[in-house]
Image (spheres, helix red, strand yellow):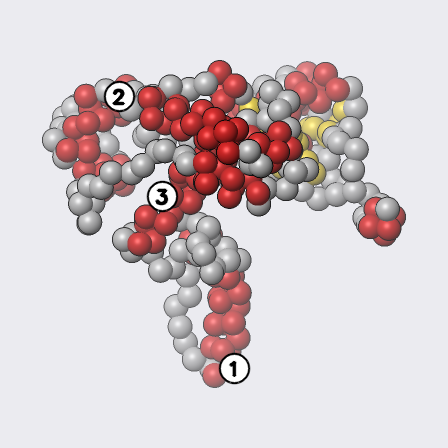
Amino acid sequence: MIGRILGDKHANTSGLTRVDVPAPFIQAPNCQIDPKTWKGPWVSLTDPSEIEKHVCNINTKQYNQAQHTPFGSGYLVQQIGMTLESPAAEEILRGTFVPDPEVTLLPETERILKYLSAPPVTGRQSFSTLITPEDFKFNYNIVKERTSSSVSGRHVGHYKAATKDDVLSTMHSLMMSLPYIVGFSPTQWRKVVDVMLEKEPGNPKIHHLHIIALIESDYNQSQRILLARGITHRMEDTNLIPDMQYGSRPGRLCISPVLNKQQTHDIIRQTKQTAAIIENDAVGCYL
């Protein structure tokens, strides 16, 4: 209660109740106006159905930013397929894929294809997709019970309670493993809820909203166990992560490159040296 009283009086703690959109959006929600560069009048929306409509439109554009890239549409997508099960996908990995000579690929795209066809430095190694009861217990014991998740409505507390019983832990860990072992997508894993939050308290402009995607809790934790932790540890062990990468690495922070750059600038200025500095801070945060 003290924190709430002393907190930002403009902060919206009851959910999104207002969205500001460029005035032309009222007549044409799908118009090509970019809210980031819009200099004209804005209109405030408070009707939930109107807010939903405009948020869905802007999110659709946000999620499809890569649609017109070489691997998002066009020749390569037709060859590879959306599920990566086509013969061309296997040919790329084997290094035998030959693009249609009538199709012009960007040099950058050709380098990506060449990189994908290169054999792993340490050779091909199997990767276990089995989630053990111990993995299940360890993961959910460190997840906060108030964590928002599960489109189905199954609360995180359900899984935390299951960690106290070996039979339930075994059952849940097996159900989380089967989709990866057999190769199928459970219906409840295909659903996601986008929660919109204000990046800046008191600024509800539609391009200043932050998307939080809530997926089923067991799906989220299975990705954490197998992908975020398992693959990352494998890459660390085989030295496949560049030394300049800081984001999502143990013992490093994604904000460290910015701090390092600032300190480097200070040293250069004080010692009156000349040096070339990488201007893109994001390169060191996440590749």
Q: In this view, does 186 lie above or below 118?
A: above
* Secondary structure of residue under mark 1: helix
Residue type at tag 1 = Gln
Q: Is residue 242 left or right of residue 42?
A: left
- The residue wearing badge 2 is 85
Q: Which amino acid does label 2 sit on?
A: Glu
Work out whether residue 112 or residue 240 is closer to the camera in this orientation and state it: 240
* C-alpha gap between disc 3 and disc 2: 21 Å
1 or 2: mark nearer the eye: 2
Percent coordinates x, y for residue 76 in the rendering: 27, 25
Give the number of the mark in front: 3 or 1: 3
User: Which element is circle 2 on?
Assistant: loop
Report the number of numbered marks.
Answer: 3
In the depicted structure, whether residue 187 falls above or below residue 139: above
Residue 118 position (above or below residue 72): below
Q: Name the residue under label 3.
A: 231
Which tag, 3 or 2, sits closer to the chain's start? Answer: 2
Q: Which amino acid does label 3 sit on?
A: Ile
Q: CA gap, disc 3 to disc 1?
A: 42 Å
Label 1 sits on residue? 270
Residue 99 position in % (x across, y down): 17, 27
